[in-house]
Amino acid sequence: MKFSYKILLSCIITMAAALGIGGYFFVNDVFEASMEREMEQAADDSNILQFAFETAALNIPAKYDLLQNSAVKEIGANLEKRGQGSSRLLRLSDENREILYSSEGFVEDTELLTNIQEQIRVYRVIHPDEYYYIQTGTQITALDRTLYLETMRDVTAVYEERTRGFSVYRNMMLLILVVSSVIMFFISTWLTRPIRLLTKATRKMTDGDYSYRAEQVSRDEMGQLTQDFNHMAGVLEENIHELEAEVQAREDFIAAFSHELKTPLTAVIGYADLLRSRKLDDEKHFLSANYIYTEGKRLEAMSLRLLDIIVTKRERLTPQDVDVEMLFGYLRDMYRGKKEHPFRFRYDPGHISGEMDLLKSVLLNLADNACKASEKGQPIEVFGESRQKGYFFAVKDYGMGISKEDCKRITEAFYMVDKSRSRSHNGAGLGLALCAEILKLHGSSLEITSTLGEGSTFAFLIPYEEMEEDGTKEGQRSGSDSSDYIDSAGGSTGTGADGPL
């Protein structure tokens, strides 16, 4: 059953129960009030008849010491004649409760008569046939005789009025229920509209339309539910896109890995078969062996890089105090004397929290990529600056640059902007992927800014973790703003190098 029908049925049942119970008590209350008036009227009639009987008994000539039964019958007949048209019946009984006079139609049972006591008036409601009566009984004394007077007052109209009241109320209740059902149908349809819209949105998303959103038609709890559902759908859509991108990245990774394996293996197998099947002179023998050695080293480097990435993803960082000057000193020693690319270093002294060897690997890979992207003679700048939230590193080159599309994917494994150029330097597109994973362990990420034909800057910020006693961050303990400058081609040192990259 639909939820709107449940609401409608619940309202109808509740309203019918409320109207039925309320109507029953209302009609009964009116009936009881009418019966109370009839009881009072019956008591008044009994008092009047008692007074009339006693008066009539006193007016009878005193022939006998006691009131005769014939006189009682005569008085009873006269009283009945006077009350004709008033739907009133009476009965008179002697001391032994033997009936002396009874109106035509008076009930024959004497149950009430036996319960009459001195100075106590009794009454009851009887229903002998299709009529209802109030029967009263009282004791009277006349001329030293004790008699019993009973009356019957017709109250059938009161009961008929109650029956009509129930009938009218029932018809009115049915009419009210029909009208209210129609109104409640539209109200329940309106109230459940947000649920129907949510159901429609759910089915749309089930069919694969993750961009579909439910319409918000109110600002109550259902509107808040719709808003939360749309927010959940947005997050779900983002997660699905991320999963799809991850699946695509894995497929690209497998394809690139297969291709990167195929190229060197083809060369290794080809030159090995050449050495095996033919007798070559020394020069060709050396060239073939050199090709096998070179491609083998490239396979070795690729496998080591993959292993580093896997290990980095699974391990946790064990932070230690790292002197920034040691990192730049390591790079300075690695590239000292290389004339192809003059290196320029500019940095602020300081300390950071991290893994020394991993940070060395990041800077070494960035510097190596800068060399591959630059022509001979173009400088490479390595920059370090102490900032408020952490220590900032940057490696800048003036090479060929990277497009915006390539910048989004350059940290993916095996992704290479210029594959021919990377392979010529024994590259496999794993260096930046390894850098991204290492920086993630340090709570950082790689920021890439590049312009085609002008060069690229690879930067990252290692956040500070502890405060010094004087309130300054670690890495901000430098005593001056002086910077070191080294040109690896000429070997000279000095101050006042180029400003921040």
Image (cartoon, rainbow, N blue to C red):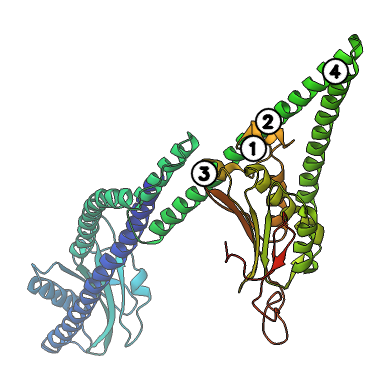
Which amino acid type is marked by label 4? Answer: Lys
Mark 1 and mark 2 residues within 8 Å of each other at the beta carbon: yes
Quadrant housing residue 164: bottom left
Q: Tell me the CA gap for discs 1 and 2.
A: 8 Å
The residue beneath circle 1 is 415
Q: Position of residue 288 (x, y in %)?
A: 84, 21
Residue 473 is left or right of residue 86, and the answer is right
Quadrant housing residue 332: bottom right
Q: Residues within 10 Å of mark 3 (few under 14, many from 20)?
A: few
**Residue drawn at point x = 30 percent, y = 51 percent:** 190
**Residue drawn at point x = 68 percent, y = 36 percent:** 422
Q: Tell me the CA gap for discs 2 and 3.
A: 27 Å
Q: Residues within 10 Å of mark 4 (few under 14, many from 20)?
A: few
Q: For numbered disc 1, what is the local secondary structure? A: loop
Mark 1 and mark 4 residues within 8 Å of each other at the beta carbon: no
Q: Which mark is residue 284?
A: 4
Mark closest to the chain's N terminus, 1 or 4:
4
The residue beneath circle 2 is 256
Task: Report if residue 458 is visible in the image.
Answer: yes
Q: Residues within 10 Å of mark 1 (few under 14, many from 20)?
A: many
Mark closest to the chain's N terminus, 2 or 3:
2
Q: Tell me the CA gap for discs 1 and 3.
A: 20 Å
Mark 4 and mark 3 residues within 8 Å of each other at the beta carbon: no
Residue 403 is left or right of residue 28, and the answer is right
Which amino acid type is marked by label 2? Answer: Ala
Which amino acid type is marked by label 3? Answer: Gly
The residue beneath circle 3 is 453
Task: Report if residue 355 is visible in the image.
Answer: no
